[in-house]
Image (tube, rainbow, N blue to C red):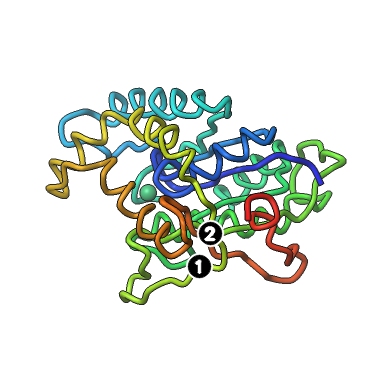
Amino acid sequence: MNRRVLSFLAHPDDAEILCAGTLVRLAESGWEVHIATCTPGDCGTTTLTPDQITTIRRSEAQQSAALIGATYHCLDERDGLIVYDKPTLRKTYDLFRTIAPALVFTHAAKDYMTDHEMASLLARAAAFAYGAPNISTLPRRADSQVPHLYYCDPIEAIDPLGNVVTPTTYVDITKQMQKKSAMLACHASQRQWLRAHHGVDEYIDAMQRHASMRGQQAGCQFAEAFVQHKGHAHPHNDLLKELFG
Ligand SMILES: [Zn+2]
């Protein structure tokens, strides 16, 4: 198998909150890391225009990715408007086709907002089919494969009905927490936005509390948790456990 990993999530800063510790570990192990978002975060502001905020947030996402030598990609959809339709699917297929990842992270199928659920569905479709010769007009890399696919935690580790999600896989990110926090801190514009919209002034603290909760379950200080996709054709061995277990 190749060693290219793609995090395909809805918004800038989702990767930093949900799976960046694991991406750091993969980068440290020699993996080529790609961080993709569906939108550039155009609604993440109470004061700026869409053009102003997306310029800032693209730059923040690129700075964060650069901290681990990763490449940032954006599908250029819009916040609150991510849909599972043919044009968006084609863009997603083309992104997957270009990278040909062996390992993919995306959102939980059921999460607190539909942008996350649509991104999850797009990633699931593209992970399954990107290697099919006729699915994209872009060249097919020889080492294309149906990848290991993992769903990140939903926000607050609950589905929209409040049911607690039980992970299949934990990754100890204790040694990577400092880098993960530094990546999240690159998204400076969002500390301000979250304070205004949610009344929360603890952007990084909330991320660390969640990782601490998962760490307690996993028997370490900080962990990220995932549910592995086991659908037909996807590998069933727990790659993350084999790499970092
Ligand atoms: Zn998000």
- The part of the image, by quadrant, that contains residue 114 is bottom left
- Nearest to the observer: residue 88 or residue 185: 185
Residue for point 72% across, 42% down: 97
Cβ of mark 2 under 8 A from ligand 1: no
Closer-to-camera residue (142/240): 240
Q: Amino acid at mark 2?
A: Tyr
Q: Are marks 2 and 1 in contact (CB under 8 Å)?
A: yes
Q: Is residue 82 above or below residue 230?
A: above
Give coordinates of residue 224: x percent, y percent. Answer: 47, 53
Residue lying at the far right of the rendered structure: 142
Residue 228 in view in this figure? yes
Quadrant housing residue 196 = top left
Q: Quadrant of the C terminus?
A: bottom right
Which residue appears at 69% of the width and 33% of the height?
Answer: 30
Q: Residues within 10 Å of mark 2 (few under 14, many from 20)?
A: many
Q: Residue at x 62, y 34 (%)?
A: 27
User: Whole-percent x and y of residue 47?
Assistant: 15, 31
Q: How many marks?
A: 2
In-image side of 60 versus 228 (left or right): left
Tell me the SS state at disc 2.
Answer: strand
Q: Gap in Å between the C-alphas at discs 2 and 1?
A: 7 Å
Is 94 on the left or on the right of 12, as rendered? right
**Residue 224 numbered tag:** none
- The residue labelled by disc 1 is 167
Image-quadrant location for residue 146: bottom right
Q: Is residue 88 above or below residue 24?
A: below
User: SS at mark 1?
Assistant: loop
- In the rendered image, which residue does mark 2 sit on? 170
